[in-house]
Each structure stands twice: as structure tokens, then as C-alpha cells.
Image (cartoon, rainbow, N blue to C red):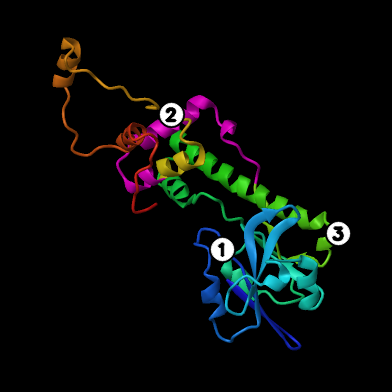
Amino acid sequence: MVQDWYVGQVTLRVVWPLPGLAEPSLKTAAGLRPVVDRLLKVSVEIGLYGPVLIAYDRHGKPDERAGGEEDWAVYADTIGGTAPYWPYTLRPPAVMERWEPGIPVAEVAATPEVDITPLLQLAAALPDASPAQRTLINLARTIQSRATDSARNDLEIFAGEERFRAVAPAVSPMPVPDAETDDLPEDIRRAGWLEVLSRRDDLAAAAIHRLRVWDGGEALPFSKYETIDLRDPHSKEWAARLRPVDQPTVAFDVVRVNERGGRIPHRPRD
């Protein structure tokens, strides 16, 4: 997302990285029309005094005059005294496009670091109040709650620093209930994930992938694997009873992940 300012003889472009997308090319941003004199990028990095604001020249190269970094107060003075700010997890493009000076602060849902869409889609397809549905909704709420807390903490940095007195939040996080995975009893969570593991659809695979990205899959079984020595007669007899599976369940993905040392297999939905 880019935002252009025209104040007197000053033309300034501010680049806002969006969650879930690759870092924008400053050369590409500098090449957009109309040509601007200077660029600022609001870095994802949080420095000692809040989000880092990096200055670039009209070619997208670091501006040596500013020492590569700009002060938020200087930026605010340049554009008229007040600088709008969107925390990294509160940057819906449509909301940012609608912004103009003086409009009320928008309330938006925080973007979580892990996409919860598959969790909610699968929960919608399951029987009400089943262990799997309760477990999926609990994880989705936990992830969303953490994202909301992160956005709130980001805004508090500006509220508590004198040097950010001219920075005005353009958004506020939509309130969500506090949630943790421990809100559900362990037996419910384990039963819920066992239900998901017994499925063969891509939503179940995507849900397990999200869980493993979130906490490594602490509530999953099959956390270890063992190599069977077929030279042992009992092991050989056991192996002879095995039968191939035509349609493996999602549980097989978990076993493969553990066998590969924790690498999560890629799925189209991921």
C-alpha cells in the first residue's frame, strides 16, 4: 500500500507493508506515477522507539541525508502536523484507501499471523458442540486474540512516547474475547484433534497445518516414530499383517512430518 502526500512543494510517498504479503520493492514504489521526491517506508521492525521509519530517495535508495532513518515527528511536521498510523496487523487496504484527514478512527479486525480461515470453514461443517468443532473454534479465537493484543500493544507505544505526540492512530483493533487453548480441557482438545486427524479432506489437512505452525502440534498424538527391525521375528510377523491404505487420513501427514524431522508438507490450500 502506498500513500502520496502533496504539501506545498513537497511530494512524499509512504510505503506500508501489508501482512501476509512479500516486502514491497522500493524501486517499484519509486517508479509509480506520479514521480515523487522522497519515499518513507514504515518498517515491520519495531525499534527502541517504536516502528522504524526508513527514508529513501526518488530512486528507492536509502537517503543518506536522513542517515537511513526518519523521525516520526519530522514526518508529521512535513505533512502538516499530524501523521496517521496503522499498526502492521491493522492494515486492511480498503480501510486505508478510504482514509482522509479528519475522519473518525476506524475499528478493524486484526490480521492474525496464522490464517484461521480453514479452521473456521471446517468448524462450520462439523456437528455443533462436537469436540472437533469446539477445538477448532478455540484455536481460531486464541490466534485472533493474540493478534488483537499485538495491535493494541503497538498502539500503546505511540500513546506513551512524547516524540510521537503528532502521530494519530487511524484505526483501533476490534475487541475480541481473550482466549487460550488451555480454556478447553486437555481431553476435549485431544479428542477434537483426533476427529480432525481421522478425516481425509483438504480442510482437515489445512487445519492440522495451522496447528503445527502455531504451537508445533502439542495436542496431537503420534509425536514420535520408531524404526522397526524386521529381522526380529515378532516385528516381521507384525509387518506381515499390515495392509496398504487406499485413502490415507490426515493422521498420515502428521506421521510423515515427524519422520522428516518436523518439516510440514505443502498443501495447495497452504
Query: Residue at the spot x=18%, y=18% of the render?
Result: 230
What residue type is disc 3 on?
Answer: Glu
* Residue 90 appears anywhere in the view: no
Mark 1: few/some/many CA within 10 Å (<14, 14-19, 20+)? some
Q: How far apart are marks 2 and 1 (CA)?
A: 37 Å
Our reading of the magenta stretch's main secondary structure is helix
Q: To which residue does mark 3 refer?
A: 162
Span of residues in magenta: 177-206
Closer to viewer: mark 3 or mark 2: 3
- Cα–Cα gap, marks 3 and 1: 27 Å
Going by the numbered disc 1, the residue's amino acid type is Leu
Q: Residues within 10 Å of mark 2 (few under 14, many from 20)?
A: some
**Residue in the image at 52% along x and 40% along y:** 139
Judging by the rendered image, the residue that carries numbered circle 1 is 18
Q: Where residue 205 is drawn, which disc sits there?
A: none
Residue drawn where x is 40% and y is 27% of the image? 223
Q: In which quarter of the image is residue 15?
A: bottom right
Name the mark on residue 191. 2
Q: Earlier in the sequence, mark 3 or mark 1?
A: 1
Q: What residue is shown at x 58% (from left), y 31% (from top)?
A: 182
**Is 231 or 127 nearer to us in this picture?**
231
Q: Which residue lies furthest to the right in this view?
A: 162
- Sequence-wise first label, 3 or 2: 3
Image quarter of residue 40: bottom right
